[in-house]
Every structure is written in C-alpha cells, then in structure tokens.
Amino acid sequence: MGAAKQAPAAGEARPAKKTSPAKKAAAAKKAASAGEASFAEESTAVEEVPSAGKASSAGETPAVQEAPSAGKASPAKKTPSAKKAASAKKAPAARKKAPVKKAPAAKKATPVKKAPAPRKQVVAPQKATAAVSASPARTVDPHPRGESRTALVRRARRIDRELAEVYPYAHPELDFENPFQLVVATVLSAQTTDLRVNQTTPGLFARYPAPEDLAAANPEEVEEILRPTGFFRAKTKSVIGLSKALVEQFGGEVPGRLEDLVKLPGVGRKTAFVVLGNAFGRPGITVDTHFQRLVRRWRWTEETDPDKIEAAVGALFPKSDWTDLSHHVIWHGRRICHARKPACGACPIAPLCPAYGEGETDPEKARKLLKYEKAGQPGQRLKPPQAYLDAGGRPAPPLGAG
C-alpha cells in the first residue's frame, strides 16, 4: 500500500485535478439542483453555467448570462405569450378610454342652437314700444322709407324736443282769464285767427262777463259784436246756447270733464281739450287745421279724421306731453311750416322732416316767409304771458288800431 499523500504547504498552489467528462456532467446537475430551482421553469431561456473559475468551452455562446448566487430567485421574465395576454387584457381598457361618445360633445360645440339670438333682436323693437299704447298702432302707417314704429316714436319725440327749444314760451294764443272766457273764445276761433278773436272778445266779455249774462243776451246785439270773426250768426247761437247749458246743467260753472264739455253747443273734442289742458291742467291733444297738416307732413300718421289723428299721435307720446305738444306743433305751423309755402330753409327741424324741400329751401328767402315774432312782428295775444314778453314777443294791437 502506498503512503498517504502529504498536504501542500501553506501558500503553495495545489495542482489542478483532472476530472472526467462524466464527473463534469454530474457536478453541473448538482449545482443546478442545489440553489437554481427557479431556473427549472426558464431552462429554455438560460444555458448551463460552467463551474466557478472555469472558462467556457470554445463551443459555448459568449453571451451566456452569469448564474445568480445560491438562494436568490431571479425575477420571472415575461414570455412572448405573457405579453400577448397582457396586451389582450389592456385592450378593453383602451376601448373604454377611447372617445367613443365624443360625437354628442361635438354637436353641442357646433352653433346649431344659436338661432334664438337673432330672434331676440327681432323682438326687441316690440319691447321698446311696450310703453306706447298698442290700440291706435294700426292708425300709424310706416314711413315710406321703411321707418319702423320704434324709429317713428323716437323721431316724433325728438321733433317735439327741438320745437320746445325754439318755442319755450309756447302757450294758447287766445286771451282768457277764466274757463268761461276760454271756452267762448275757443268756439269763436273756428274759421278765423286767434288774433281776430283776441281783438273781439274784450268788448264781448266787458258787456257779458258771466254765463248768466250771455245766456240772457239779445242775439242781434251779440251778432254785431261777433261780426269781425266771421260766421257770426252761427257763433252767436253757439255761445248763447252753451251759456244757457252752463247755467241750467252745471250751475254756471264750466265742467272739468271731457264727457260733460262735449255736450255743450258748439263744443267738440278739440275745444274740450283746449279747455281741459289750459284751464284745468288736464292733458289733451288739440287737433286743429295746423296740427292735422303738420303731423301728416311729418309722416306721423296718414289719417285725415281728427279723432283718428288724435289717437295715432297720442300713442307716440306720454300723456303728460300732450298739451305742450299741441302748442309746439300749432306754433310751428303758424310761424314757419305754412300750408302753401313752408319756410324749409329756416326750419329748425329740417333734418328730421321727410317733407323737406316742399317749400323754400334758400335760407335768405325762407326767412322772409316767417310770421309773428319770428319775423319781428306782433304776436296774436293782447295780453300774452310774461314769459313771452321776456323772450322778446310783442303783444297784438287792439281791434281798430290799424
């Protein structure tokens, strides 16, 4: 028997042992079973790892991964089949997030339901005219140039404001001291001028100062006094008749209601509104010949009946403006906007008048057509208001003064 092999000295290198191929395979299997159990499932993706310190054989692929240390399990790698399964699971989620229901949102964003906006603009004029009485609206014809009702209201009110600046002292041009004198003077003003009436009434009221006096008067004596006013017989009958009615029905007092005034002989709506507006302070529109002519010339209405004109024009203005409006229009018709030859070249509201050009447009020639105080002439009242005199107005001469 040979002697036992001596152990190599410390620090001395031990000679490498030669191992047979069968032992190498057994060692590899033992290493795999010792701590590499996790590689059993993924053996197809990992090649066999050579023992520590040994170089790989010439036939092995150089890209072999190093074996992890014993006892550590490497993270499981997802196979292509696992990736396909994950992508299949994510597909429903992607479908849920897909903008499948964005079509309705696009419909909301599109301006399909913006049609009500222009409708509001169309209705707006109707709201603007809500403050105007709608009943007489049918009597107001549209302007030939297509003027809307709202534009007509604005233009009419602007004309009134302009005239108020031109005639700030506008007043009834009949002299009177009480309602009785005013109602008699208004009846006498038919078919004549206010100037002629103002020159006649001082003698009448000096002789018959009260309704009781005129009711008992001799008609022939009254006719002689009223002769200068024209139609003196019919007017005598009217003033004596209304005086009797005042004494018998109203105790000698002039009533302050429209329905009572129109019952008096010779008193119509025009006369009643003159009395109500200037003696009692109750608004009313006086539709005389000047008023009728101008409101048609200004295209406020095409009506010819006085009652319909009153309703149509009254619908364009607040009720509180009716009395002063009547004065402004009548004064303008007497002084500037004449029936036959209006002084267009001297008219302060020419830019607002659709009939501009019917009269004289030359400023110098137009100024020669002005009447009364605008032309430096006396007015129509013998006793005008102080405001009229302060503004430069001149009182009219008495009857027979020349």
Image (tube, rainbow, N blue to C red):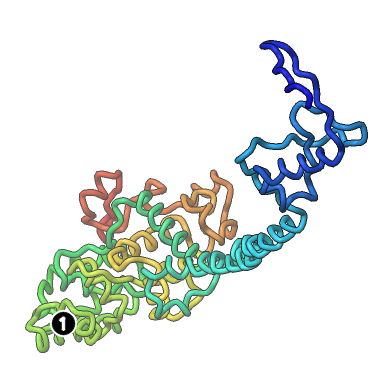
**Image: 195 above or below 247:** above
Q: Looking at the picture, tell me which residue is in the foreground, 187 or 329.
A: 329
Please tell me which residue is depicted at 36% across the width and 49% down the height of the picture: 165
Could you say where residue 33 lies in the image, as x and y percent from the top left? Answer: 69, 46
Q: Is residue 326 left or right of residue 175?
A: right
Could you say where residue 239 lies in the image, as x and y percent from the top left? Answer: 21, 80
**Image: 182 above or below 39:** below
Q: Looking at the picture, tell me which residue is in the foreground, 325 or 238.
A: 325
Count neighbours of disc 1 (C-alpha within 10 A) and say few if under 14, some if 14 to 19, many if 20 or more: many
Q: In the displayed image of the protein, which residue is found farthest to the front?
A: 1
Could you say where residue 184 lies in the image, as x and y percent from the top left? Answer: 22, 74
Q: Is residue 42 in view from this perspective?
A: yes
Please tell me which residue is depicted at 14% across the width and 79% down the height of the picture: 214
**Image: 384 above or below 146:** above
What's the residue type where badge 1 is placed? Ser
Q: Secondary structure at mark 1?
A: helix
Q: How many marks?
A: 1
Q: Is residue 354 left or right of residue 63?
A: left
Please tell me which residue is depicted at 50% across the width and 62% down the height of the picture: 151
Please tell me which residue is depicted at 71% across the width and 62% down the height of the picture: 88
Q: Is residue 209 left or right of residue 74?
A: left
**Image: 246 above or below 155:** below
Q: Looking at the picture, tell me which residue is in the foreground, 214 or 34.
A: 34
Q: Is residue 305 left or right of residue 189?
A: right
Q: In the displayed image of the protein, which residue is found farthest to the right?
A: 59
Q: Quadrant of the N terminus?
A: top right
Judging by the rendered image, the residue that carries numbered circle 1 is 243
Q: Is residue 110 in view from this perspective?
A: no
Locate residue 215: give its quadrant: bottom left
Could you say where residue 342 lies in the image, as x and y percent from the top left? Answer: 51, 58
